């Protein structure tokens, strides 16, 4: 069973080189409809500049749709989704003012921080590995290459469909 932080980390995506969350995923976490979330944002559009929130292109939306197998028909989206950067998610707390919204925002901010820490520790580990490679001869090259493969970030994990148990 996934902890709330792990569930949140799984729905943080990378789009245009930025870590973002989709409007539908955020709406689910906040316990509101996607339409209600987007309406609240549109009523407060000045709080959401392009580096806080942006709408996906047709190509980006299609790529995500194929990864997560969303419906195009009956009940599917009629528009391209919006995504929110970490700053945009933080700004949502000023727009959605329920107690649940506060708790969800805290959990999301902690998930973003944890991801940053993991990325930072991976960079430190990579730097140390490079230093070790310089010290030791070619007989360890295979070991170092295997370690680098394990450290490499996966290209893109398909999102799981269905209910979590």
Image (spheres, rainbow, N blue to C red):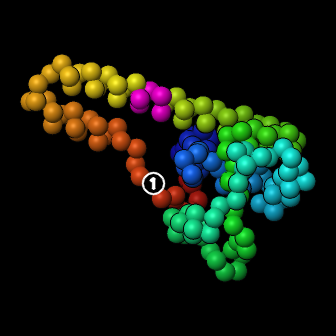
- How many tags in the picture? 1
Q: Is residue 7 visible?
A: no
Magenta segment includes 125: no
The residue lying furthest to the front in this view is 50
The magenta-colored residue range is: 119-123
Q: Residue at x 11, y 25 (%)?
A: 137
Is 90 left or right of 161, judged from the image as shown?
Answer: right
Q: Residue at x 8, y 30 (%)?
A: 139
Q: Report the magenta stretch's main SS.
A: helix
On the image, the x and y values in percent for residue 144 come to 21, 33
Q: Residue at x 72, y 34 (%)?
A: 106
Q: Quadrant of residue 143?
A: top left
- Assess disc 1: are there few (<14), some (14-19) or many (≥20) residues with their C-alpha within 10 Å of its C-alpha: few
Q: Is residue 98 above or below residue 139?
A: below
Residues 155 and 10: in front is 155
Q: Is residue 90 visible?
A: yes
On the image, the x and y values in percent for residue 121 come to 44, 27
On the image, the x and y values in percent for residue 123 come to 41, 29
Is 27 left or right of 73, judged from the image as shown?
Answer: right
Q: Residue at x 60, y 31 (%)?
A: 113
Q: Is residue 17 above or below residue 123?
A: below
Helix, strand or loop at disc 1? loop
Q: Quadrant of residue 112?
A: top right
Magenta segment includes 121: yes
Is 74 left or right of 145, judged from the image as shown?
Answer: right
Q: Is residue 8 above or below residue 117?
A: below
The residue lying furthest to the top in this view is 135
On the image, the x and y values in percent for residue 23 come to 71, 56
The residue to which callout 1 is attached is: 156
The residue lying furthest to the bottom in this view is 73
């Amino acid at each position: 069973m996934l902890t709330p932080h792990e569930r949140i980390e799984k729905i943080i995506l990378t789009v245009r080189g930025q870590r973002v969350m989709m409007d539908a995923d955020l709406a689910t976490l906040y316990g509101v409809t996607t339409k209600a979330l987007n309406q609240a944002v549109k009523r407060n559009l000045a709080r959401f500049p392009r580096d806080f929130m942006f709408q996906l292109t047709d190509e980006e939306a299609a790529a995500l749709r194929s990864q997560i197998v969303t419906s195009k028909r009956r009940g599917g989206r009629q528009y391209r989704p919006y995504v929110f950067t970490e700053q945009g998610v933080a700004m949502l707390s000023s727009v959605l003012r329920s107690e649940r919204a506060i708790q969800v925002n805290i959990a999301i901010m902690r998930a973003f921080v944890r991801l940053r820490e993991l990325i930072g520790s991976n960079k430190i580990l990579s730097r140390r590995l490079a230093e070790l490679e310089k010290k030791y001869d070619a007989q360890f090259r295979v070991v170092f290459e295997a370690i680098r493969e394990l450290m490499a970030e996966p290209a893109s994990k398909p999102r799981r469909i269905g209910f979590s148990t």
